[in-house]
Amino acid sequence: MSRVNTLQSLFRRYRRAGDIVFAWLMLALSIFLLSQLFDQTTYRAGGKLFAQPRFWPAVSLIGMVVFAIFHLLGSALSQRIEGRWQEVLLWLSAFEYAAWFIAYAALVPLAGYLPTTLVFALVLTWRVGYRTPLMLCSAAFGAVIIVVLFKTLLKVNLPAGQLYEWLPDGLRQIMLIYF
């Protein structure tokens, strides 16, 4: 009997507060995806069942719905844990970095690849809490190395920044080619 109690205490200790919210979201997502199956896949008459383009997506989505239901039942029948909404807010805070990336992608054509990468590397380093001069210099050095590697060695064509148009001719040409 003590082994069962030990397993139950381990389960309670490692259980997350926002588990029920995650279970509902996964169930809703899996049902939505399953509802789109007939619009997004086809059926070929006369073909074998396992060779149908709809078969394997249907198997995976039905499995996703079934396991989402099991997860929801397990979460609903488990003991309530405080802090559910704090954990959900923590999950939502990850979208902040998606917003940073969108802002970065929007500013590269305006300011140029090097200045934007340098500024965002420094700002994000500061944002995550690395505020010592060594960390900020490391971030700036890493940003410059990334830009040089992408533009020179990998020859990635990125849009030139509109800011580069204001530079003198010789410097503008170097910035357009290498940075």
Image (spheres, grey):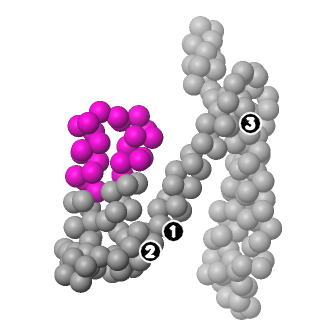
Which of the marked residues, 3 or 2, is nearer the chain's N terminus?
A: 3
Q: Residue at x 38, y 62 (%)?
A: 116
Is 131 one of the magenta-colored residues?
A: yes
> Which residue is the site of mark 2?
109
Which numbered disc, 1 or 3, marks the residue closer to the eye? 1
Give the secondary structure at mark 1: helix
The residues bearing labels 2 and 1 have C-alpha atoms spaced at a distance of: 7 Å
Magenta residues: mostly which secondary structure?
helix
Q: Residues within 10 Å of mark 1 (few under 14, many from 20)?
A: few
In terms of secondary structure, where does tag 2 sit? helix
89 over 27 or under it: above or below: above
Residue 177 lies in the magenta-colored region: no
The residue that appears at 56% across and 55% down in the rendered structure is 99
Which type of secondary structure does the marked residue at label 3 adopt? helix
User: Which residue corresponds to mark 1?
Assistant: 106
Q: Compute the Cα span from label 1 to label 3.
A: 36 Å
Can you identify the residue that label 3 sits on?
Answer: 20
**Residue at image point 74% right, 36% down:** 20
| Residue span colored magenta | 121-143
142 is higher (above) or lower (below) than 129:
below
Label 3 Cα neighbours within 10 Å, binned few <14 / some 14-19 / many ≥20: many
- The reply to whether callout 2 and callout 1 are in contact (CB within 8 Å) is yes
